[in-house]
Image (cartoon, grey):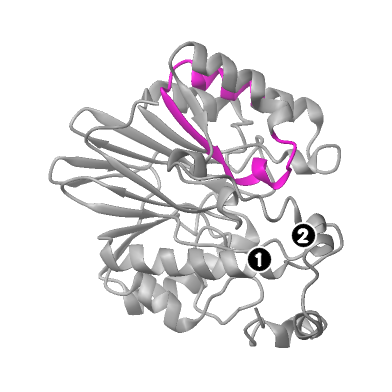
Amino acid sequence: MKPLRKIRVYPLAFESFGVRSMCTLVETNDVRILLDAGVSLGPNRFGLPPHPREYAALRQCRRRIIEAAEKADVITVSHYHFDHHTPSFTDWANLWSSAEISARIYGGKIVFAKNFKSKINFSQRKRGWLFKKRIEELSVRLEYADGRTFKFGGTTIKFPPPVFHGRENSELGWVLMTIIEYEGEKVLFAPDIQGPLCDSTLRLMLNEMADLAIIGGPPIYLADFRVSREMISKAVRNIALLSRHIPIIILDHHILRDRNWRDWLQKVIDNSIKIGHSIVTAAEYIGKENHLLEANRKDLFEAEPPSREFMQWTKIPMRKRKLIMPPI
């Protein structure tokens, strides 16, 4: 894997780190950009709440995001799911969030966010309105970035028009991709496109000719439940096509919520290597092992049974549990 020379990319929180997120810090000599400063845990998998090891990963990733935010000039919000932005309410059970944490992340920053008034579903419109109220109190500047381009010295930050969150006309709404270009290098950040599943999203990505792409993969853990196997196969074919044109792909997020994800992708990964390209997880990109905690939650509970105190905490009604830090 040939690294970029001009643009520096630092994955901070992903499923390969044990949490739900795609938070990444991207730096040029002009500007530091924190992409999608959110993180969460899946509240229920296999009939089980998150394991203590997942909470340890959540706490660690949240700290990492806060530290990166303190250095960042710009923070982006691709859409208003809680694993992609940090709300100002207290929720230790799912998000490790609070008003103080939100202020530390967004306070005094330039924020480029998805417009909550257009191309958005109902739940995200409400969250976007609440986010606006909070951020206008905290940030230096809040800009709705849909279809816009911004310059910082020799660095260009471009936000194409919103694309679908997965398949065409998805009930999950739309997301913003981010393209960062500096001195002839280009990084494409494509959260929650799920492959992509949508042909128009694929065409947009191919037209950009990026050197590195950070892509949210398809939700294979939902196969035959919310997403058909035919759609997942289409996403895999699209990843294969992208890998022929993009030298480095960081593929992570939804796809790593299933520990058998390589069964779908190994051939594509191998073919990419043959032409001198690479498809890696966020953890692999920085030379670390994958820690798929949610995907292995059932095994974690069997191998490392949580303490009685922790299990008692999980029995507290969620409304109250959010206000109490987990005993880990």
Mark 2–mark 1 CB contact (< 8 Å): yes
Please report the residue visible at 63 percent of the width from the left and 87 percent of the height from the top.
323
Q: Quadrant of residue 143?
A: bottom left
**Residue 121 visible, this angle:** yes
Earlier residue among tags 2 and 1: 1
In this rendering, is residue 305 above or below 42?
Answer: below
In the image, which residues are magenta?
236-261
Q: Is residue 321 left or right of residue 95?
A: right
Q: Quadrant of residue 183?
A: top left
Residue 86 percent coordinates (x, y): 49, 68
Please report the residue visible at 81 percent of the width from the left and 83 percent of the height from the top.
308
Q: Is residue 315 left or right of residue 324?
A: right
In the rendered image, residue 321 lying in the magenta stretch gets the answer no
Q: Is residue 323 left or right of residue 74?
A: right
User: Which residue has dot 1 on it?
Assistant: 53
Q: How many marks?
A: 2
Q: Quadrant of the N terminus?
A: top left
**Mark 2 and mark 1: Cα distance apart in space:** 8 Å
- Dot 2: what SS? helix
Residue 11 percent coordinates (x, y): 43, 49
Q: Is residue 7 left or right of residue 88?
A: left
Residue 107 percent coordinates (x, y): 32, 75
Please report the residue visible at 55 percent of the width from the left and 45 percent of the height from the top.
289
* Residue furthest front as drawn: 303
Residue 305 percent coordinates (x, y): 81, 70
Name which residue type carries label 1.
Answer: Arg
Residue 300 badge: 2
**Residue 126 visible, this angle:** no
